[in-house]
Image (tube, helix red, strand yellow):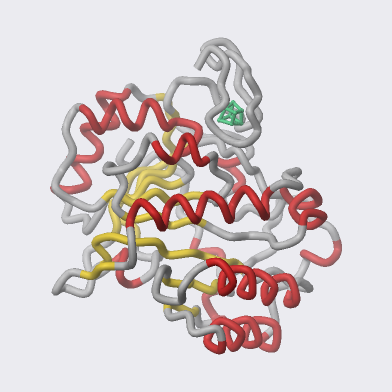
Amino acid sequence: MSGCRLCPRSCGIDRSRTPGYCGVTSTLRVARAALHHWEEPCISGERGSGTVFFSGCPLRCIFCQNHEISTHSLGREITTARLSEIFHELAEAGAHNINLVSPTQYTPQILEAMEMGMPDLPVVWNTGGYEKVDTLRTLAGRVDIYLPDFKYAFSDTAARYSCAPDYPEVALAAIGEMVSQTGKPQFGEDGMLKRGVILRHLVLPGHRKESIEIIRRLAATFSPDDILLSIMSQYTPYEGCELPPELRRRVCSYEYDSVVEAAVDAGFGGFMQDRRSAKEEYTPDWDFSGV
Ligand code: SF4
């Protein structure tokens, strides 16, 4: 990490001394490690997903519901050996999988922790989708399930909300690599996802046409049975985020339903959310529990 180029920001910064754009140095920081019940049903199941929330983020979207950890890097410093212990503690607590949330900026440290021994559970890479294909290739054979976002179709939106005008093409290439690693979704007899890609899209207020363009691009790139789509309605304008006027409201039924309709028309299967899920309790307390 003397010249970090793990993600498309390619800062080239020495993270042993200074945080990069992602806001964190090379020392692992984790805000929470606990069973989580708010992922898609085939990830959370009845017992919960063994979720590790990493501090920092290469994307740092202005509307992030986890902004305390993504933008302000809230978290507790731990070693790779402690991370390995956390994986086993989550498995002993009954987790269906090990779910790594916003892991990209710590890819080498996570791989090192995995080398120390992993429980026999699927590993989930839960990411904003802003990933380098070369970095993803280091995960081949170690990650079973990818859970990326595909946030924006238009470069100007990606620039305005995430300072990442290259996001649309970068994310599409990353998702292609993820699909090529996992193949089509595979479920166990218990209905839990064992392998595959669930692609999440959070519908933003005022961006219905952009969401439908995302569906169109996915349909032009993938077969509908290559991925599962999770269309999310939970966008909530959080206090503490400085938001432009168009992002200061929740998504209406017309916006959300028309995006779901476009996905169904394109032949995709997956998950939709009850609009009542636009609640702040979807964001856990950052109390360092399990860390
Ligand atoms: S992981 Fe962080 S330091 Fe490394 S290239 Fe990305 S933003 Fe920069």
Residue 164 position by quadrant: top right
For the residue pair 153 and 42, the one nearer the viewer reads as: 153
Q: Percent x, y for residue 213?
A: 69, 72
The quarter of the image that holds ligand 1 is: top right
Which residue is drawn at the image coordinates 54% and 58% (left, top)?
149
At which x and y percent is residue 127?
Answer: 49, 49
User: Exactly how many numbered labels are in the figure?
Assistant: 0
- Using the image as rendered, state which of residue 107 and residue 281 is in the foreground: 107
In the picture, measured across the screen, residue 17 lies left or right of residue 126, that is right
Q: Where in the figure is residue 91, as x and y percent of width and height?
A: 17, 48
Quadrant of residue 87 in the image? top left
Vertical placement of 230 versus 34: above or below? below
The answer to whether residue 139 is left or right of residue 245 is: left
Q: Residue at x 51, y 65 (%)?
A: 200
Query: Which residue is located at x 33 percent, y 35 percent?
Result: 291
Q: Which residue occupies 22% across, 64% down?
A: 47
* Residue 191 in the image, given as x and y percentages of width and height: 22, 74
Look at the picture and state if 199 lies above or below 224.
above
Image quarter for residue 198?
A: bottom left
Q: Is residue 63 above or below residue 106?
A: below
Q: Is residue 199 above or below residue 67?
A: below
